Image (cartoon, rainbow, N blue to C red):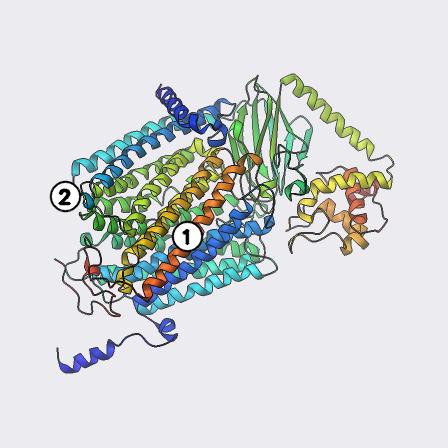
Amino acid sequence: MTTATASHDDHGHHGPAKGIMRWVLTTNHKDIGTMYLWFSFTMLFIGGAMALIVRTELFQPGMQLIEPEFYNQMTTMHGLIMVFGAIMPAFVGLANWMVPLMIGAPDMALPRMNNWSFWILPFAFGMLLFTLFTDAGAPNFGWTFYAPLSTTYAPSSVTYFIFGVHMMGISSIMGAINIIVTILNLRAPGMTLMKMPLFVWTWFITAYLLVAVMPVLAGVVTMMLMDIHFGTSFFDAAGGGDPVLFQHVFWFFGHPEVYIMILPAFGIVSQIIPTFARKPLFGYASMVYATSSIAFLSFIVWAHHMFTVGMPLQAELFFMYATMLIAIPTGVKVFNWVSTMFRGSMTFETPMLFALAFVVLFTIGGFSGLMLAIAPADFQYHDTYFVVAHFHYVLVPGALFGIIAGVYYWLPKWTGNYFSEKLGKFHFWMSFIGVNVTFFPMHFIGLAGMPRRIPDYALQFADFNAIATVGAFIFGLSQLIFLFLLIKTIRGGEKATDQVWEGAEGLEWTIPSPAPYHTFAEPPHVK
Amino acid sequence: MFSRTWQRLSSVVLGLLSAPAAMADWELNMTRGVTEVSQSIYELHMLIFWICVWIGVAVFGVMFYSIFKHRKSKGAVASQFHESLGLEVLWTAIPAVILIAMAVPATTTLIKMYDTTNADVDIKITGHQWKWQYDYLGEDVGFFSNLTTSQDEIYDRAEKGENYLLEVDKHLVVPSGQKLRFLITSNDVIHAWWVPEIAVKKDAIPGYINESWAIVPEGEEGIYRGQCAELCGIQHGFMPIVLEVVTSDQYQVWLDEQRAGVEAEAAAALGDFSYDDLMAEGAKVYARSCAGCHGSEGQGMGSVFPALAGSPMALNDMAGHIDIVLNGKPGTAMQSFSAQLTDVEIAAVITYERNAWGNDTGEMATPQMIIDAKK
């Protein structure tokens, strides 16, 4: 390298800019990843506070704290914020940080778009949250916003909601395109597709799902906008439209969406378990094929959310069989994780504890999913707390525990400091207990017949509701331990080694801890 | 055969599990219900449940065995195996077989549930925000069914009754031993009509008529309660269903009573009413049909439902007041009450609204004014 280019490189490799403009103008994948993660953590607390308001009202029968109208706003906003504001951006944040480090790329392929896709989000959620303070109130029609409750009968804030969804969609699509382009073009020499770490693989597949279905969501909210403001009747039966069409289009987006929220977590867990079992992942290739099969199947099962809308028998049977098929690739993944542990040499640091809890509790959510797939039985489960228990099991100890496990796993790499294991384990056990006390009783009250989305309930459901509320506060408050731990670790702690964990393997563990502002300016060679 | 064995096995294990907990079955589990279909669904549910339990025991068993045996602190040395085609094929094939075993009884039950032919009694069920309307097709009988739990019970100002939130003014009365066909639709948003004991849950969708059916066997007469199962707006949690199953003879008697009642009401509307009569009746109608949105003291609710106490319409505009109660306000939750309430009830509730909570107009709406306004 000549002196001239070396000095040029020096100029290019200066550290981050000073002050707030570092974050506004940054195109650095690590900065943007950090912003995504803090944003989603903030949304987790806002959405969590709403959940606690809901649980407090449900602590005992009767209306004590809030009115039914505000209750509906809280359940709706809780769902929207957790799905679009907490879980999805957290995964994009982890992808931003880790995908370039895992494939040996200097940055994301489209850094300016990366900046933009993040900075849309605060405005989208600002717009959604501000509706809480308007006269009409926030959206109150559930996060699934079925027409015509969300069109003809909606509060006027629905228009802000529609534009908010559009902005989130644009952000997600740009983020997904960026990840696809980065993975396809910036892999280090020698890193073939079938050598990519599983977190990269699962995100690669997730990104395709996002590109495929976010436009469908944009389409359905645009049809709503037309119905509300421009006199069309897509979903209005009185004008010749079809309310069930809404549900078909929504769930064509909505079902792949649930895999968007779980596949990257599969990837994280597939990184963590081999590290702490000190043993290579069992069945790498079958993991890749299983993930692809799940992604494919996710496009042909959407109407299992609609078993009670009155579809023809043949359609019910098709969607029941297709849904049951998903159990096979999902089972393969669980069996592979267990086989990875078998005859390993395991230790149980905090990331591993969260990953193990993920395997057990996600599988329980999978079992209730299989039960829900059985169409005749679904007539009794549908729209009860059994469904609430099911999707919270796959999303909280599923997706969210996956994210938390990933944060603990990579935190020493990001900050250069080990976190306090004692505090981490305390956080884990409180979360684990809280999550189960909150959501397990919901199976019982659901089977006993309590419908979801009701602000008040008959007396026979009182005991389990009270227990669930106690659990929710344990779980919610224990996330403050996590916040405290994060701040403490960023500020200092025992210095982390480059490899961080004894059994860790992969390119991200070859660079120094903390990861320098610029990494892999020279691509590494993968054998 | 298959499901029988499972059922016997499951009842043994369930008995062992629930004995120390001493909890009644209905608190934890799905109801068996009283119809053939509801019982097949229950058996299917238990079959899948126990399959899941045994898979869970096997998978988590291996996992926890590894966690306890293969830990570094016990000196375990990691093996490096990471592939086995045989195992992969095996654990793809076994679940596939189990799934087929589940799909067979599920398909049979579903086909049975979809057979709505040869019904003896047809009942049209229409969802409204937030009440159910029942029409007995060909019988000339129809009515609305409203929640009777008082606002005082809901807001903890009074002791909650035994059937809190699950009680209505008019039950859906049906005969036992006959095939009932429900034709389910909606007048506004999507609702879902659900009675767990007969395992009927069907969405009520505007523009659609969905079908479902049930036969409650003779000997299972009684009262079965259910709720709306699809988010339908603010009072979604407050539109229950009460199904009263009676014998065929009792059912015929009940139908005759209903027809006679309608005639009596029409005749009554032509009679004379005092201000006090109307106020007393109006207070009852208001609590049942209006207080859910407009508040028990006419205070309204937030910015969505206007207050009636002190409202210009209730104070000054009698014609407008009658019009909005009769015809509703399109695009809002304020619906038409002309078919839901009798002329007397409408006159009474308007009189009440114009004289309660400090709205002291002294004006009285008579049933005759309502009959004239309908013309």
Instruction: Indicate the position of residue A409 as horizontal and vertical percent values.
Output: 28, 55
Residue under label 2, please give it. Answer: B79
Q: Amino acid at mark 1?
A: Ser
Q: Chain of mark 1?
A: A
Location of residue A218 (image quadrant): bottom left
**Residue A282 visible in the picture:** no
Mark 2 and mark 1: Cα distance apart in space: 37 Å
Which residue is at the front of the view, B79 or B48?
B79
Name the amino acid type tagged 2: Ser
Question: Please, what secondary structure does the residue beneath circle 1 have?
Answer: helix
Residue B229, given in percent of the width and then of the height, sits at 53, 39
- Residue appearing at x 37%, y 76% in the figure: A19
Residue that carries the numbered disc 1 in the rendered image = A478
User: Residue B125, how many percent across, how many down?
Assistant: 60, 34
Q: Left or right: where does residue B194 sit relative to residue A393?
A: right
Q: Count residues near mark 2 (Cα–Cα under 10 Å), then give few for <14, some for 14-19, many for 20+.
A: some
* Mark number, residue A428: none
Q: Are marks 2 and 1 on the same chain?
A: no
